[in-house]
Image (cartoon, helix red, strand yellow):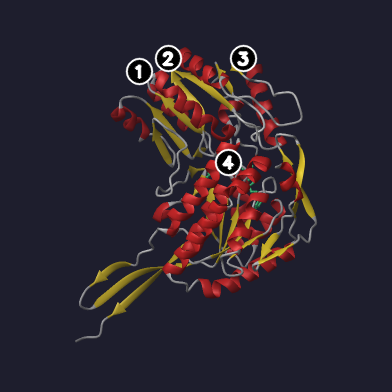
Amino acid sequence: MYETLAKRTSTLVIDGRAVAGERGTLLVIDPALGEPFAECPSASSAQLDAAVAAANRAFAQWQHSSCEERRALLLKIADRIEHNAPELAEIIVREQGKPLALAQMEVGGAVAWTRATAALELPVEVIEDSPTKRIELHRRPLGVVGSITPWNWPLMIAVWHIMPALRAGNTVVIKPSELTPLNTLRLVELIAEVAPPGVVNVVAGGGALGRDMSGHAGIRKIVFTGSTPTGQDIMRNAAGTLKRLTLELGGNDAGIVLPGADIDAVAEGVFQSAFLNMGQTCAALKRLYVHESQYEQMCTRLAAIAARQKVGNGLEEGVSFGPIQNRDQFELVCELVDDARAAGARILCGGEPLPGKGYFYPPTIVADITDGTRLVDEEQFGPVLPVIRYATVDEAVLRANASDNGLGGSVWSSDIEQARAVAARLECGTVWINGHAEVLPHCPFGGCKMSGFGVEFGLEGLLEYTRPQLFNINRPAP
Ligand code: NAD
C-alpha cells in the first residue's frame, strides 16, 4: 500500500492539464513516521497567474451555465470521489495521520456534501409585484474564487470551498496546505475528468503562494479556513482589490456541564467532541467547565475513556488515535502541557509524547487548571483537554465568553430549557446542547469575534458565492 503512493507522481492541474511545478517539489511528511514519503509539485507565481487566467477564461462560459448543468457537474464529481474513495482515504491517512476509519468518513462526508450542495436551489426573490412595478433579486456568480485550505480535514474542507463556488457559477483556483497537498491534487485531477478545462485549477505551495492569491487582481473572492493570524494577513492583502472574504478561523470552544448533569451519559460525548481528529478540529470542544459538585466524577470518567484509546499508525488495524499532523503543532502541544504542569495542574492521563520518530501524543486530560493558563487561554488544536472547576453558572458563562474566539460552544444538561437559557448567553456562531463539533450540509456554520466572519453550508453559505443583482422593472401604463 505504501509503495503505490510513494511511486505516484502528483501534478498541478491548470486549465484542465496536468503540469509539473515550476518551483520544483516539496516533501510531504507522514506524521506517523516523522519522515517524508512523497513529493508534491511546487507552483511558481507565473503558474498561479496561468491558473487564474484559465479560471477567468472558463468563467466566461461557466457563469452562464444552467442550474441543471451545474447540478449535473457536482453529481458527476461526487461519483468520481466515491469511485476513488479507497485511494483518497489512504492518501489522507498518510499525509494527515488520522485513523483509516476516520479518513473513510472524511471521504464519505465529501461525497455527501457534494451531493447536498448539488441539491441546493438559488431562487429569484420577488420583492415587489404590483401593477406598476416588478422588482426581482437575482444572484450572480462572482468570478474566480480562490480557496486556501488547512491540514486538519484537507479533503472535506476543499469540498466545502469548491462545491458551492461551482454550484453558484464561479470558477476556482485552490491552494491546499503545503502539509497535506496530495489529496487535493488528486481531487482536482478527478474533477478535471468531468469538468470543462479551467473550471477548477489547483496550485500547491506555502504561505507565499497564498499571499499571492489574496492580492491577485484576477481573483474576486477568497474563501479561507485556517488560523486567525493568517486570516488577518489575507484580509490586509485582499484590501487592495476589495475581494470578498469568507474567513473560517481558529476557535477555543468552551463546553459547560450544568450542575446535575448525567455525567456517565455526558462524558462519552464530551470526549468524542474534544478529541475528534486528535483534537485538530476547528470546532472541537477545547475547554471544559464542570460544576464543583461533579468535577472529580467527570475527570475520572474522561480519563477512563482516554485510557481505552489505541494510539498508533492510522493504517494499522484497531488504531483509534493517530499522531498529531506536524512537528510544530506537536511541539506546541508538548509546550502547553508542560506549562500547565509547571503551573500546578494535575495530569490525569497522557501528558508526555510517545517515544519514536512519529508525532504521537496520547489523549491527555488536565485537571486543577484555570483561566490564565496557556492551555486554557490559547487554542491547543491537539489531543489535550483542560477541565476547569466552576462554582456558579454565571461564573462559567463569563469565563466561557472571556475569549477572543467565538466559533462554537456547548451546554450539557438533562434540562433542555435550562440549557437553552445558558446557550443564548454564549458568544459564538453555533451552540450545541448535549453535543459539540457537529456540522451539517444544510446548516450555516461560521464564527464571530476573532473566529472570522461569513458562513458556509446551506442556502446562506451558497449566497456567499454570489452577488445580488436587482431588476427594477417599471411596467408600461396599460
Ligand atoms: P494556517 O493559517 O497556518 O494555514 C492555512 C493555509 O493558509 C495553508 O494553506 C497555508 O499555506 C496558507 N497560508 C499561510 N500563510 C498565508 C498567508 N500569509 N496568506 C495566505 N495564505 C497563507 O492554518 P493551519 O495551521 O493549516 O490550520 C489550523 C488552524 O485552522 C486552526 O487555528 C484551526 O482552528 C483553524 N481551522 C478553522 C476552521 C473553521 O472552520 N473555522 C476549520 C479548520 C481549521
Specify the amino acid type for callout 4: Ala
Q: Which residue is mark 3?
A: 344
- First in sequence: mark 2 vs mark 3: 2
Quadrant of res 311: top right
Is the C terminus in the top left, top right, bottom left or bottom right quadrant? Answer: bottom left
Q: Quadrant of the N terminus?
A: top right
Q: Which of the numbered marks, if any, corresponds to residue 294?
A: 2
Query: Disc 2 and disc 1: Cα gap in Å?
Result: 8 Å
Question: Among all residues in the image, which is located at the extreme right?
Answer: 24
Which residue position holds label 4?
A: 103
Q: Measuring from the top left, give residue 459's x and y in whole percent.
A: 39, 56
The CA distance from mark 2 to mark 3 is 21 Å
Neighbor class of circle 2 (other Cα within 10 Å; few <14, some 14-19, many 20+) is some
Q: Nearer the viewer, residue 155 or 240?
A: 155
Return the disc, 3 or 4, that comes first in the chain's sequence.
Answer: 4
Can I make out residue 336 in this image? yes
Q: Amino acid at mark 3?
A: Gly
Q: Amino acid at mark 2?
A: Gln
Q: Residue 27 location, x and y as percent?
A: 77, 47
Quadrant position of residue 12: bottom right
Label 2 within 8 A of ligand 1 by Cβ: no
Mark 4 or mark 2: which comes first in sequence? 4
Query: Residue 51 at what x, y percent from top left?
Result: 66, 66
**Which of the 4 image quadrants contains residue 308?**
top right
Q: On the rendered structure, is 283 left or right of 120?
A: right
- Which label belongs to residue 260? 1
SS at mark 3 in the image: loop
Q: Are marks 2 and 1 in contact (CB under 8 Å)?
A: yes
